[in-house]
Amino acid sequence: MRHTHFTILNEIENELKNLNLHSKATIKNFTRSKTYLEQKACEINSWLRNHQFETESDEIYFFKNIKSQLLSKIMVSKYQIDTLLNLPHSKNAIPDYYKKLIQKHSQIPKKLNQFYKYYRSESFHRDQNYFLRKNNIINNHDQYQFLFFDERITTKMEYTLSELLAKEQIIQYLEAELDKLENPIQINQANFQSELQWTGTNLDFIELIYGLHHNKVVNSGNKEVKEIAKTFCKAFNMDIEEQVYRYFIDIKRRKINKTRFLTSMTENLNKVLELEH
């Protein structure tokens, strides 16, 4: 199942898109998303119980970069449902509701600060201890907490990492919802129909959006990334404006050439210019 190590998250995103679950933030869509993600997690856990990775590097990569991401998506879906269920009835109270939640999730528990810095600094010297199943050591005085703990399907810090990743995604979701309220799009997109189709990757698309924003070539840099993305999504028939901030985090995590698309675009244009010179 080595192929799955590198493709499962893309496959999940594609399936969620096919199910049209990113199109509208509703309890129904979030519930369907959670159900689908939990089903995928169950399938992966069943596979893990009888699987031995070819190398320790493969196992570390899977638990650190794949399974933790999937678990964080499940946590976020559950939180999104709770957020909508507890939404204030008064529209005027909703912005403060979002701001309080953002403040709450921006705080990292002190006991997790060291691990959070370890992950965010892209360190790897403790990965064998954190993300190998053979190094699962339960140091907990509560004898019942891990009564159903299955060391074949999890690692020491996998769940903790998932919680931290979920916090980041939850903040992005809340900020996006708050942005909708505070900076409503003024363009009348209802009557706009485009025949253009983006054929690059989602990451390429977001990289372009951020490039335009930080070069201050759209409204002199006075428009938020989310606003630019929404208009461009309409122009290119995309449906990922709700995922802008999550994709940006994926770009930031790149270790080599964080601006792959923009670099490639520059190189290709220069080649054409040289030929036509």
Image: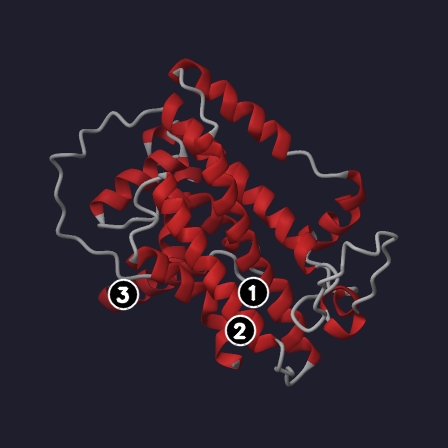
Residue 180 location in percent, x, y? 37, 28
- Which is in the foreground here, disc 2 or disc 3? 2
Viewer-proximal residue among 219 and 120: 120
Calculate the distance from the C-alpha at mark 3 to the C-alpha at mark 1.
39 Å
Instruction: Name the residue located 30 percent from the left edge and 66 percent from the top edge.
Output: 274
Question: What is the number of the mark on residue 66?
Answer: 1
Q: Are marks 2 and 1 in contact (CB under 8 Å)?
A: yes
Q: Helix or strand or loop: what does disc 3 sit on?
A: helix
The residue at the point 53 percent across, 59 percent down is 70
Q: Is 18 drawn above or below residue 102 in the view shown?
A: below
Instruction: Identify the secondary structure beneath mark 1.
Output: helix
On-image quarter of the C terminus:
bottom left
Q: Secondary structure at mark 2?
A: helix
* Residue indicated by mark 3: 272
Given the image, on which type of amino acid does mark 3 rest? Val
Query: Looking at the rendering, which quadrant does residue 55 occupy?
Result: bottom right
Task: Estimate the spatial distance between the alpha carbons at disc 2 and disc 3, rounded to whole Å.
Answer: 37 Å
Write down the residue under mark 2: 5
Residue type pointed to by label 2? His
Instruction: Single out the residue that lies furthest toward the bottom.
Output: 54
